[in-house]
Image: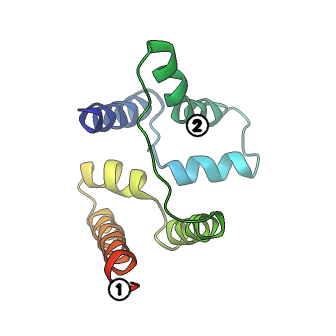
Amino acid sequence: MQAIVGGGLIGLSAALLLLFSGRVAGVSGILGNVVVGAFGARVWRVYFLIGLLAAPLVYWLLGIPAPHVDMTVNSPMLLLAGVLVGFGTRLASGCTSGHGVCGISNLSWRSLVATLTFMGAGALTVYIMRHGMA
C-alpha cells in the first residue's frame, strides 16, 4: 500500500510542477541547480527538495510508524554508490524521475531507453551483489 501511495504522490508532484511551472521534475537537475546556487527566481527548487525530505516528519506527525530499513553495506560502499549514481545521471542527462516518470509519460524514446538502462543495470547489480560475490 505504501508503494502505491508513494508512487501516486511522485506522479502527482511531477504533474503539479509541470502544470504550475512548466518544469519537468528531474530531481538530479533540481538538486544540481541548488548545489551550484542557481536560485534567483527559482527558489521553488529548494522547496521541492525540502518536500522530498519531509516524508519522515509527515509520518511522525500523523503517528504512522516509519518503515524499517536495514542497511547491509558500510558507509564507504554507500558513498561509492552515490557517486556512481551521480555520474550515471550526468551521463544519461537525467535521472529516474526525469526520464522514468516525466520522460516516458511524454512518450520520449530517449527516456524509455535511459529508463530501461537504469532498470537493467540496477537488476544486474543486485544479482551480482547477491549471487555473484558470495
Depth check, front residue: 60 or 9: 60
Q: Which residue lies under the disc numbered 1?
A: 132
Q: Is residue 71 left or right of residue 121?
A: right
Q: Which residue lies under the disc numbered 2?
A: 49
SS of the residue at dot 1?
helix
Q: Residue at x 44, y 32 (%)?
A: 17
Q: Amino acid at mark 2?
A: Leu
Quarter of the figure that contains the N terminus: top left
- Residue 21 percent across, percent down from the top left: 48, 31
SS of the residue at dot 2?
helix
- Residue 99 percent across, percent down from the top left: 37, 57
Depth check, front residue: 77 or 85: 77
Q: Is residue 36 left or right of residue 57?
A: right
Number of other residues with Cα within 10 Å of mark 2, as a class: few under 14, some 14 to 19, many 20 or more: some
Q: Amino acid at mark 1?
A: Gly
Number of other residues with Cα within 10 Å of mark 1, as a class: few under 14, some 14 to 19, many 20 or more: few
Quarter of the figure that contains the C terminus: bottom left
Q: Residue furthest right?
A: 37
- Residue 55 percent across, percent down from the top left: 49, 29
The tag earlier along the polypeptide, 2 or 1, is 2
